[in-house]
Image (cartoon, rainbow, N blue to C red):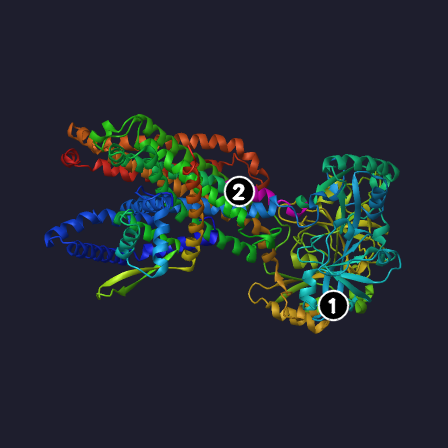
Amino acid sequence: MGDPGEMVGSLMRRLAGRSHRRRRARELDEELALHAELLERDFLASGMLQSEAHDASRRQLGNQTRIAERTWDALSFGPLDTLFRDFKFALRALRRSPGFALTTIITLALGIGSTTTIFSVVDHVLLRPLEYPNADRLVLLVQRGSEGNQRLVSYPTLEDWAASSSGFEGMSYVRGTGVTIGAVAGPHHALAAFVSPGFFKLIGSKPELGRTFAPEEERPSGASVVVLSHELWAKSFGSDPYVIGRTVTLDSGNAVVVGVMPPRFSIPLWAALWRPINQIIETDPALKSRDFHADSRAIARLAPGVDPARAARLLSVVQHRISDAYPEAEAKWTGADVVPLRTAVVGNVGAALLALGAGAALILLIACVNVANLAAVRGASRGREIAVRLALGASRFQVMRQLLVEMLALAIVGASAGVTGSYAAIGWLRTTAPFDLPRAAELAVDSRALGVALLLTVLTAAVFGVVPAMRAAVPRGSGGELLGSRSDQAGSRHQTRGRAFLSGSQFALALLLLMGGGLLAQSYRRLQQVELGFDPRNLMALSVSPPKPKYADASATLALYDRLVQRLRTVPGVEEAAAVNFMPLGRAGIPTRLEVPGRTPSSDDLATYITVTDGYLRTLRIPLLRGRWFSSQEMRAPGDGVVISESVAKRYWAGADPLGKTLTIFRSSQERPNFGQAVPSIVIGVVRDVRQFGLEDAPDAAVYVPLSAEPWPWATLVVRESDSHPAAAAVLRRAVLEVEPAFTEIASESNDTFDPVIKSLSSELAPRRYVLGLVGSFSVCALLLAAVGIYGVTSYSVARRTHELGIRLALGATPVGICKSVLLRGMTPIVIGCVVGLLIAFLAARLIEHLLYNTSISDPVVLASIPVLLLTVGLAACYLPARRAARLDPTIALRND
Amino acid sequence: MARERKDELLPGTLEMLVLKTISLAPLHGYGIAQHIRQLSKEVLQVEEGSLYPALQRMELKGLVTADWKLTPTKRRARYYRLTAAGRKQLGIEESSFGRLVDAIASVMQMES
């Protein structure tokens, strides 16, 4: 029977045979009856008497039941059949104790489900290499200052690096700018990556369509070409398969599409299209300046066998020389850091994910402890049944196999529920990724995650199900004494202690999770109360990029902003409107160098360069601390006045009056020809710091200049609405389109419209809310599981002690005394568990430090409330069985068995 | 099948005999037993306790198939007949049995 086809056929016939077993049994009876009859006829024919022939035929045929049995044996599956019987028996046994079965299933579903989900996420986001050839050798390069701070590298410096450092296979510079692209759906604003020669070769990915840049296209005065990202191709070109060779308008010029990159090719993350850097090398002053450290990426490939740390040391030697050669721009920047691309892509989500992973692992541990506890309790109560089976000749192996099958049945049901849940959770995560989860599109519950789930299932069933049950059921040695013993004795000291230890450890683990959740909640609360420096309520914002050929000229752009602001001010419900280059909390900003007479210049002399229209301060309600704001006259024709934020004042003139002091700032709009030009200024006012980058970043040092002094090529329009009758976003949008219909990007059905600033504040907090929600629900799960655990163990011990408690009551113990003694037994492991948990929490606090904001493990609110919560829940879980014990009727208790 | 029971026949030969017997015409269980007994001049006794399990096994292996028919005396009986696989199996067993018999015979005929 070696042929697999034959084996399958045989198996199918066996299964068919089983299902028709009853019919086949009748048939066999009929066959045997006929056989007997024909035998009898032949015996008669040979001259026997009727009665003799009858007896002879029966004798000849022998035991009919035995024939039938042997025939059935042919239908048997052997070991498989035994397993099947065990399963049927297990189901029957479990149906008799649905409470045990259900609790175990839910426990395992929670444990395995959460672990599988978090494992899938951690695996895809953190563990797997990025989907580029030899992605582990791709790195980002940044400069490191003497105080360990980092900044982006300028193009001239990167070229020096590339020319003279070893340890790298290649380096490439990427300059990011916004461009207007003429697409099928109308002109679009898109982020372009201008890449230095060899960029695509360095990364090694193949395009989805067409090709990447040819060497001659990357040389100065090469043809104007562009490679599109998959997303841009899909969104703006309708996934047109014939897009290669088409000419598209980019700003005021044209470019030929030569290629489309595959989905998930995102280097840098924001790039929607790629162009050779030679296209802007002549026109972009930022590329020639060693002072430019923004809107760019330096990407490199390590030489084989070189790790990032060694590459960083090699590169730092080169940078040290550069720092000596260009003291003005590079002083203090004496080193370089090499950051693996994956670290850069994953960012600080990694830390959050690891915390979640730890949370899921804790849940799993608690679940396993619960299963062990439940199994031990059940095993102990089945001691007699198992002793009987052993006495009747079942081997220990057979008993164990039966227990394993029982646990496996539960584990499989629980794990299926858990895995189903994690499919749903991952699907939800992938589609609605509540924050910018890196690599979200790659998420899936795949064979690796299923493998982990399967392993967990078998392990929990075998280790945490069978071993404790077996130990509880067969206390060592023969079952002889158990057979005779009564089932109501309180179990051996050893077993009781083991169960108390398990309950205690559950509470320790639950405490860890709850402490983590509590600290995250405190951080969240503190972040919500952060002083922003402006009033975010009733503020609406929309960023606009005036389309290029028409608004390439600075004065045209300025006039447009002016018209827009004037028009918005007239919309009913609008109190004030303004335009600004970088909105607070926008996670963006360009720094300018500051020079103060009498101070040696240092590379720390930076402040965010904010350029605004007249009503900005009133619109955002940023408090003016000293001096004055720009007059309307200065707004139109800027003088040498500059307004600074309080951090700048504190940095240079601490304790002195900053007003009237002189300060040199540098023009920072990279697209203007006068980029980098020094502007000597006089401080006329000081305003409060605002959080420019994010809630968790320090309040930002900033300088304010009139927009007319520096007409930015894009801007954010901000509108302060009245509390009582705010204008709708659609009305504001219509007003903008009235002024400039060419803003097609906001005219289409896209989401680009005025958004409440408070909403971006909320999305800023979204990742934290998300992590907090998950850790919070983990903590609640842990608490519930621990409560179920202690409740089960205490109830069980009360049930086993019924007889003993009855005697005590009969001898004069008071119900209160009984209640106290049960509570004491139950609460002891809980209290010890909480103390141990607290100790571990202090030791493990470092692990979630970076997820906390102004909160530490010794936070009094968390430290006081979490243990109290646990003790209260524990007390409640122990009180129910204790009350039952106190209400025992001694006469019934003594008779009870 | 591994679980072959002891009987007077050489192990494994019962199936071959059954296959050969029904290769001529479909027969019911009793007919098969009688046929083997008569042709072997009463030497080979097929026990009912072996025959029916063997038929069941062969049915599972797909070597034989059975249907209910009427006997000449108008009794309902389960008639077993060969399948294509059974016919092939019979060929294999016949030739290997032939070789076995020849081999044994040449050993036994050795001059002592």
Is the residue B13 above or below the residue A395 in the image?
Answer: below
Residue wearing tag 1:
A243
Q: Identify the element where label 1 is drawn.
A: loop
Disc 2 residue crowd, few under 14, some 14–19, many 20+, Cα 10 Å: many
The spot of residue A320 in percent (x, y) is: 83, 35
The spot of residue A384 in percent (x, y) is: 24, 34
Badge 1 amino acid = Val
Q: Identify the element where label 2 is drawn.
A: helix
Disc 1 residue crowd, few under 14, some 14–19, many 20+, Cα 10 Å: many
- Taking the spot 87% from the left edge, 40% from the top edge, the residue there is A326
Main structural element of the magenta stretch: helix, strand or loop?
helix
The spot of residue A514 in percent (x, y) is: 46, 40
Location of the C terminus of chain A (image quadrant): top left
- Per the rendering, the mark at residue A357 is 2
Depth order, front residue of A816/A577 = A816
Chain under disc 2: A
Badge 2 amino acid = Gly
Q: Is residue A348 a member of the stretch shown in magenta?
A: yes
Answer with left or right where residue A222 lies relative to residue A604. Answer: right
Is the residue A651 above or below the residue A617 in the image?
Answer: above
Depth order, front residue of A327/A240 = A240
Query: In the image, which residues are magenta?
Result: A344-358
The spot of residue A850 in percent (x, y) is: 60, 40
Is the residue B55 above or below the residue A571 in the image?
Answer: above
Chain under disc 1: A
